[in-house]
Image (cartoon, rainbow, N blue to C red):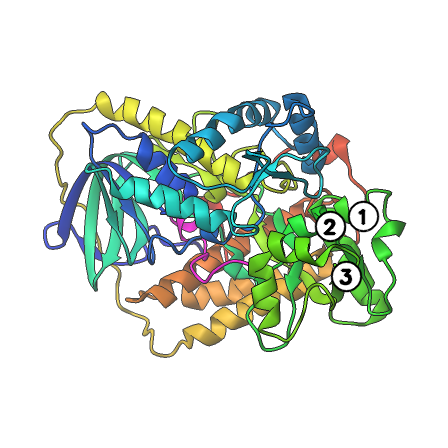
Amino acid sequence: MDQPRRYLTSFRGKQNLHQFTDILIIGGGIAGLRAALEVPPTMEALVITKEHIRESNSAYAQGGIAGVLSPEDRFENHIEDTHAAGAGLCDPEVVDLVVREAPAQIHDLVRWGTIFDLEDGHLALTREGGHSHRRIVHALGDATGQEMMRAIIARVKQAPNISVWDSTFTIDLLTMDGACVGAVVSRAGAKVLIWAKQVILAAGGCGMVYRETTNPPVATGDGMAAAYRAGAELRDMEFMQFHPTVLYVAGSARYLISEAVRGEGAYLRDVNGERFMLAEDKRAELLPRDIVSQAIFRCMERTQHPNVYLDLTHLDPVRVRERFPGINRVCRNFGLDITKDRIPVRPGAHYMIGGVTVDTHGATTIPNLWAAGEVTSSGLHGANRLASNSLLEGLVYGAICARNAIAAAKTMPTQMIAHPIQCKIDPDLPVEDIDVEDVTNSLRSLMVRKMGIVRDRARLEEAKRDVNFWCRYVLPREFQHRQGWELQNLLILARLMIDAAIRREESRGTHYRSDFPARNDSQWGNRLPSPLVKDLRF
């Protein structure tokens, strides 16, 4: 086998269970649920989630949502900040669309019961790296995603036309005659073919391709990989954003320390106590994430220390505890008092900027398939996402996708048909001889070492050889469990990410090549589509 198989698993339309719906939504994060809420009562929507509906990247978002809500701020300021962070690759039409939709989306969340933090009776606004004004709304101090998801899940549960299938793994998208017609999923140990008039993909990112990540275990890029196998275009796969400040305590799970901590005045210091960001730019800790992450990497290399430190000790302790209750609680579990002790941090994979190509309508390159949120490359983020623009993108594109999918579904016949589609995989290769956990861990470690914050051709070529080898003996096998499918998805995406990083011979945004350290607009001021699935070779 020298290219990905069309489907990961065998199925037979005449034998498997079938389910029908007007709109199938794959993913239960903010983008997927916002799409579901747009579906009118006269149509049926089915939301598929990999685990419990509360388990998504959206629920872990700390900082907040960016939007122009202050009289001192203007849309033009937010647009300019987004372009500056995106390092020349943002789509101007998309940026303008999303930024101008922000206030309305935030007010909808309030109307649906989201309780944002207030100051003097108005929405409290904070500032984060890369933003020229205070425009970030937040909830429960540093648990914005959790509060947003609480409110929007409650709203979804009130809608009689929306069904939610928890603990359901989307194995692949179903296609016929080049169009998307549904998905094959694994639910309670059985394979189910879901037939839909229109499909909205909102399955999140792939942070778990790295060992050091802020993402929950569900973020294995299943939606991206499924779309790719179905023939959808992916692009910008070299742009994985690393969050600069992830709690680094040996033996513990990694925990995001919000951008808002630096926005409120925290300093970054090296092991010797030096505030090293001052040497980068006068904005220091408020520089965009890509610059801060690279500066931290260089600092750790220079000091030969595994981390740097966030320092809040000069800030008002009462204000710090009130503003960051979740971070304070986590740090106290490790004996750290954030008002007195420096917090050990280092960068970790945080947000996948690349993904499934979509236009301003949310349409992918496959008919009847729409996409929203982190699974996509919309053009909003360019080469580096501006802090707190991701939840905003999910809301805006979730609504846009749904409106267009609904309009398309209304033009289709009312009666739906289950076609006798099938896929048979020859059981030539056993799966028992593969230690899935070991290969997964090896892949994630390799991506940190050779496809991390700082890259060069020699290490990227080594990574490509290793991943190609794993692909050749893992991808031909047919697994019957989630861990095997996740590994296959991660391998495909890792291969595409490495390929894009090799091709882009410059440094831009989150992509830094030590052998090509300069930005080159004349040659590389463009997007990089991934090779089509039929052209990818291992």
Residue 521 lies in what quarter of the image?
Answer: top right
Residue 54 location (% of width, % of height):
37, 54
Q: Amino acid at mark 2?
A: Tyr
**What's under tag 1, amino acid-wise?**
Pro
Q: Nearer the viewer, mark 1 or mark 3?
A: 3
**Image point (74%, 59%), residue name:** 312
> Which badge, 1 or 3, is on the more N-terminal residue?
3
For badge 3, the amino acid type reads Thr
**Where is residue 177 drawn, in percent x and y?**
27, 34
For disc 3, the marked residue is 313
The CA span between labels 2 and 1 is 7 Å
The residue carrying mark 1 is 517
Label 1 residue SS: loop
The residue drawn where x is 40% and y is 76% is 434
Q: Nearer the viewer, residue 469 or 343?
A: 343
Which span is picked out in magenta? 214-228
Q: Earlier in the sequence, mark 2 or mark 3?
A: 3
Would residue 404 be found to the left or right of residue 295 on screen? left
Percent coordinates x, y for residue 383 in the rendering: 65, 40
Q: Is residue 55 above or below residue 27?
A: below
Residue at the disc numbered 2: 512
Residue in the foreground of this view, choosing between 433 and 332: 332
